[in-house]
Amino acid sequence: MLLRKQTYILLTLSFLMLACGSKNDKKVAENKSENTQIFEPNWESIKKHYKDPEWFNQQKFGIFIHWGAYTVPAYGSEWYPRNMYMDSAQFTAELKPQRTGPSNENKHHVKNWGNLKDFGYKDFIPMFKGEKFNAAEWIDLFKKAGAKYVVPVADHHDGFAMYNSNTTRWNSVNMGPKKDILGELMKEGRAKGMIMGASSHYAFNWSFYNKKDHFDTTDPQYADLYSAKGKNLNEPVSEEFKELWWKRTVDLIDNYQPDILWFDFMLDTPEWREYRPKLAAYYYNKGIEWGKEVVLQDKNFYEQAFPEGTVIYDLERGKLPGIRKLPWQTDTSIGKNSWSHVTNWKSKTANSLIDDLIDIVSKNGNLLLNVGPKADGTMPEDQKEILLQIGSWLDINGEAIYDTKYWKTFGEGPTEVGTGHHSEGGNKEFTGQDIRFTQKGNKVYAIMMAWPENNSVVVKSVKSSEDKVSNVRMLGSDETLKWSQDDNGLTVEMPTQKPGDFAFVLELTL
C-alpha cells in the first residue's frame, strides 16, 4: 500500500513538472517570438526601430553577379529575353518606345534561332548548363579582388531562379545547370569569411515579356515563366502575381538568410506600395531571429518608395555630388554596355573603376561592382585581370578605403562627376589635381586620382590653421617625403618611384 502511495506521489510530481516545463517552454518560445517581432509592417514602426548596420559601411567594396540563361545567346544584354520579343515599337507604359520596327535582338534571334513560337526564351534554359561553374574559384577571385561582400542575382526579370526555389519549377536545380548556384556561392563565401547577399529583380517579370499570338509567351503552359499577364501591355499587376512575388521572396529569405537583400526597380512603383513595409518588417525581424543585422537595399527609382532611414539607398551607374551622412551604395558593371556576358562586352579599365571606388568611398558610399560570367560558368579573362588589378591596388592602399569615415570634405580638384542614376557615361578621366579624402582615427588619407604634374602636389584643403599635419608618407613607398604646410595647404614632393599604376595615397598624421 505504501509503495503504491509513493508511486502515485512520484507520478503526480512528474506530471506537474512536465506541465510546468511545458508551460515554461511555451513561455520561452512566446518570448523569443516577441523578441524577433520588433518591426511592424508600417513605416512608423520601422523608422522607430531601424538603424543602418555599421558593418555595411565598413566593407566598402562588393561584387555583383549577373548570370543566367540570357548568357546563352550572349547578345545585347541581360534584357535579351525581353527584347527578343520586340518585333515592333511596342513597350509597356513604364518604358516608352525608343525606336521603330523590330529590335536588334528580335532580328538576331529570328536569324539565328528561328520562329519565336517554336523557339522562345524557355528553349535557352536547357542550353544553360554552367558545366564549368566552380563556386570556390569565383569566391577566391573575389577575395583576391579585395571584395568584402558578394551579391549574386537570385531572380532576374526573366523569371528563372538561380537557386533551389520552392515556388517555381523554373530554377537552376531542376533545369539548366542542375545546381543550387546561389546556395553553393553562399556556402563557399561564408566559409571564406565573405558577407553574402542576394538580389531580386522578379517584380518586373509581370511586364517583362511581350505577349502576342505568334510568340510562345502566350502559351498557358509557360505562364509560370513568362507571367500570367495577358496581351494588354498596360494590364495592372494582379494580386495573384503580387502574392507569388511575396512567397518567392519569403522563400529566398528563409532558406538562404542573406546578409544583404537588394531589389531592382518596379518594387518602387505605386502598385507595390503595400508590400514595401511588409517586406522591410519581415526581413528585419528575420535578422533579429538569426542574430545578425541585415541590409535591405533599394533604388527609390520611381518614388520615395522606402522613406529615408529605412533602407540603404542604392544608385545605379551613377554617383552622388557630395557626402551623404547615411551610408549608400553605387552599383555598376565592369561592362560598359551590359551587366551579363555578351560577345561584344566592353570592359572599363581598372584605373577608372578604382577611381570610382575612391570617389564613392570619400562620399560615405560603397561600390558594388558587377561581373558577367559566360554561360559555361567561366569568368572572362579581361574581367579577371581587372579584378586582380583592383585587388593589387587594395593590397597596398586598402587602409585608406576599408573601415574609413568621410572627412570634412570629400575632395578637391577640377573634374566633376555625373550624378544620379545612369549618369556615369559622361564622366571624364580624373587628373593629378583631383584629390579625395577619407579618415581613420588621427589619419587623413589624401588620395590623388593620378600622378601629379611636376611630381609635386598642393593639397589645398589641409591648411595649417585648421589641420596641423605632423607626418606625411605615401602608402606603398619607403621613401621619406619632403613636405611643408601653411595656410595655402599642404605641399608634398612625390617619391622618385611610383608605388603602383593607379591612384596614389598620402597618409597624413594629424
Image: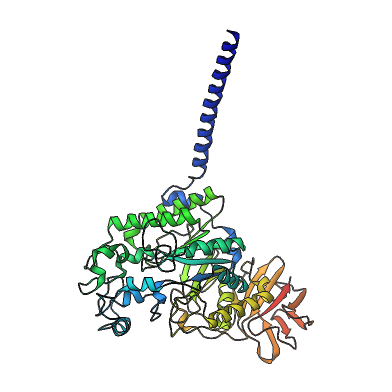
Image height of 245 relative to 439, above or below: above
In percent of width and height, residue 222 lies at: 28, 65
**Residue found farthest to the top:** 1
In percent of width and height, residue 282 lies at: 44, 51
Quarter placement of the N terminus: top right
Q: Is residue 458 found left or right of 127 in the rendered image?
A: right
In percent of width and height, residue 155 lies at: 41, 65
Q: Quadrant of residue 423?
A: bottom left
Q: Please tell me which residue lies in front, 481 or 407.
A: 481
**Residue found farthest to the right:** 480
Image height of 248 relative to 218, above or below: above
Q: Is residue 165 found left or right of 312 in the rendered image?
A: left
Residue 461 visible from this viewpoint: no
Give the tally of numbered discs: 0
Quarter placement of the C terminus: bottom right
Image height of 43 relative to 353, above or below: above
Q: Is residue 448 found left or right of 373 in the rendered image?
A: right
**Residue found farthest to the bottom:** 454
Q: Please tell me which residue lies in front, 420 or 41.
A: 41
Q: Residue at x 43, y 72 (%)?
A: 129
Q: Residue at x 43, y 84 (%)?
A: 343
The color scheme shown is rainbow
In percent of width and height, residue 258 lies at: 51, 58
Q: Is residue 142 found left or right of 285 in the rendered image?
A: right
Q: Please tell me which residue lies in front, 381 or 297.
A: 381
Q: Please tell me which residue lies in front, 373 or 433.
A: 373
Residue 25 visible from this viewpoint: yes
